[in-house]
Image: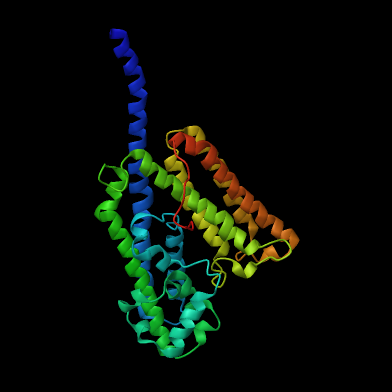
Amino acid sequence: MKNLVLALGFICAPLGAAADVATAMLRDVVDHHILPRYSTLAERADALADAAEQNCAPDAAALRDTYHSAFDAWIAVSHLRFGPSEVDNRAFALAFWPDSRGATPKTLAALIADADPVGTNPQAYADVSIAGRGFYALEFLLFDEQISTSGDATYRCDLVQTVTADIATQSHAILDGWTTGYADAVAAPSEGGPYRSTEEAAQELYKALNLGLEFTADTRIGRPMGSFDRPRPKRAEAWRSGRSLRNVEVALVSLQDLARRLAAGSDAVVASFDDRFDDALKVAGDLDDPVFAGTATPQSRLRVEVLQQSVAAIREVARDDLGPQLGVASGFNALDGD
């Protein structure tokens, strides 16, 4: 009997230690990755709305600066497509892209042509199609030659102010959802919560990492690449405001932070992630192609392909090393179809 007790003790001790590591990891990710980034988004969205109130002109320096700052903050949380960001389609209301059918300019053009009163009412604007809301709609209002100059200037000003106010409202709604219960639901899973175990919560965070890497490689980089015979540089994300490559870099920096925190139980996995992320960020930094215009020429296209491959290498570490460490698989994500 004594030997059996000792044997069970040796078995249970590592399991208990692993559980403690998983619990600490969840709390660390919530407290130091998720909450600070959503707080930053809310703060910068407020600054954006304030700048629009002060000067709504599309070329106003302060407005454009706060647009970029708030957009950076969104990209840094754009992989966290679960929980409060899914309620009322908040994430899609902040970021409707890709827009393969051109719904955003069509929606904005119709609002401006009709001087639709909903465009002057931030509260009612929540009922407008998500194609007419968020950062990509604002990009058209500030940077698109046609949308930014069409219709009545006073109405366009009101619309800019309404869109920025809506961005701030949605950003605060997501943050409030996290701070009023969802943070603890992820960090301390319980039988009655959305996550019943540390494994389920870890799976959600692992899916978020994979979502961010997949979207960056396949959509942010892959979409403007098109095919060799038919490149699509004008399909790059936020090319009107010159943010295509910047979004990739901001996303990678944020995803590296998440990956390191998820892999905290293994120095070797953390080191593997750091090597791959640092390589990808160096390739991006050397690219000197802010809107992936180089996808249209063979030599420059090769450099964009190298960037895509470097992100794919990060995904391999997540799949082959981090997944087994956490005991989870990637599963489906919030951008998957039915």
Q: Is residue 68 above or below residue 106?
A: above
Q: Residue drawn at (38%, 65%), measured in percent from left and top? A: 89
Q: Residue drawn at (36%, 44%), measured in percent from left and top? A: 201
Residue 42, given in percent of the width and then of the height, sits at 34, 63
Residue 17, given in percent of the width and then of the height, sits at 34, 28
Number of residue marks: 0
Q: With 226 as the anchor, is 331 left or right in this view?
A: left
Furthest-top residue in this view: 2
Task: Decide if residue 294 is in sight here.
Answer: yes
Furthest-front residue in this view: 338
Residue 305, given in percent of the width and then of the height, sits at 67, 54
Q: Is residue 68 above or below residue 8?
A: below
Task: Decide if residue 289 is in sight here.
Answer: no
Q: Residue drawn at (44%, 76%), measured in percent from left and top? A: 132
Q: With 197 as the anchor, is 79 left or right in this view?
A: right
- Can you say which quadrant of the picture contains the N terminus? top left
Residue 49, given in percent of the width and then of the height, sits at 36, 73
